[in-house]
Image (cartoon, grey):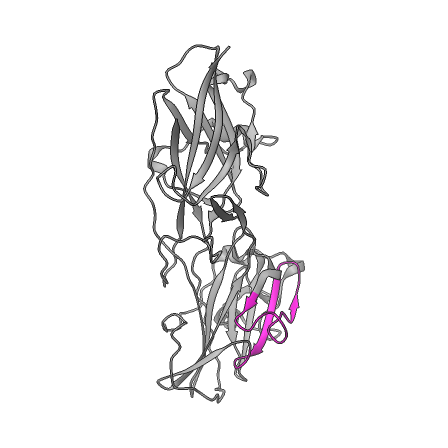
Amino acid sequence: MWVGVACAALFVHLNYFGITAASPWDPQAVKQPLSQFPGLHEPQKPVISPEKCGVDDVYRVPCGEPGVAAAQCAALNCCFDGQQCYYGKTVTVQCTIDGQFVLVVARDTTLPRLSLDSVSLLGGSDAPCSAVDSNADFAIYQFPVTACGTRAMGLGDHVVYENKMFSSYEVAVGPLGAITRDSHYELYFQCRYADTAVAALAVQLASNSPPMPVAASGPLMVELRLGSGQCVTKGCVQAQAAYTSYYTDADYPVTKVLREPVYVEVRMLGRTDPNIALILGHCWATSSPHPFSTPQWDLLVDGCPYQYDRYLTTPIPVDGSSGLQFPSHYKRFVLKMFTFVDPDSKAPWREKEEMLLQQDWSLLTNWLWCLVEKSSS
């Protein structure tokens, strides 16, 4: 029989960036808009949140000219600590008055952290589209607005130059589906030039379709639930603390970051015979509330971790030390969160894709299922 519960993957949220300059650059415009780019939007006032400014001194990248004041630093969408202006833990887009894109990419833009080596522009990753400088936490790109696949268009008294930054990611392919646990990031960015100003705009594509949870049970009265407990004391073991509390119906869908541990428990209900043991045969995930739909991704096969998963599902022993009255009635395991990808395009699976010009989270649901049986000693 099977039981199911929904959990959801968490994606990065939208960011806006803008910068103004004192004098113009005189570009050459084309007259037709480009359909492959998102619709044009007004530049937003630059805002960077305080949590994005917690960059270690050794990895800080200076922003602006030496001695820049706090107000000027804020206008550059950078962080200021009272003495130094530096780039925050995000993607910052700037436009120079001599027609250059400046793109500073932080590893902490996403969770899991973005692989800086995986970043490319529309024109590829070779010079001048490759990073001009980098450290362990940041990569810096600077290139002419006419290079690296940039497209231009006229918009009133503005000339708009548009490009796209995106990251590659590793895809695992199984017999019934494909998944990834790597962050996938796409950012469209623009430089706008007019007679009196220069402005930058960046818009990330995301989807937002929160699902409803589902649960089902069979004659054995088996329940599948997710542990929500957290370690709060020194020396605590998270794999044990996770099962001290559980998500309730009101908590679903539960949001998880890619590669974040998901603590799963399957238990028998209404049985008091200590000689009965619960056995997990096959556990898998789907992208819909139908247990035999595709795509699917195996978690346990014949009770063992699916061997072709780079991030193996880990069974957690349940014995007398657990404090449970009937430990043999329980099975626990932990998996690393993932999202399905399209088997043909290898793009992350999205129920609905739209561009959102507001700060929000994108939710994508994975449904967990297990075939179980009982044995008697």
Quarter of the image for residue 66 reads bottom right
Quadrant for the N terminus in the image: top left
Q: In this view, does 60 lie above or below 151?
A: above
Query: Range of the magenta residues?
Result: 120-147
Q: How many marks?
A: 0
Residue at the front extreme of this rendering: 175
Q: Which of 101 and 81 is in front in this view?
A: 101
Q: Is residue 158 above or below residue 337?
A: below
Quarter of the image for residue 214 reads top left
In the image, residue 15 lies at what x, y percent? 44, 62
In the image, residue 332 lies at what x, y percent? 50, 27
In the image, residue 168 lies at what x, y percent? 55, 59
| Residue positioned 47% across, 15% down in the render | 375
Whether the magenta-drawn stretch holds residue 132 is answered as yes
Q: Nearer the viewer, residue 319 or 279?
A: 279
Q: Which of 141 and 118 is in front in this view?
A: 118
In the image, residue 163 lies at what x, y percent? 48, 73
| Residue positioned 63% across, 75% down in the render | 127
Whether the magenta-drawn stretch holds residue 195 is answered as no
Q: In this view, does 160 lie above or below 176?
A: below
Quarter of the image for residue 46 reads bottom left
Residue 81 in view here: no
| Residue positioned 55% across, 73% down in the render | 123
Q: Main secondary structure of the magenta part?
A: loop
Residue 333 in view here: yes
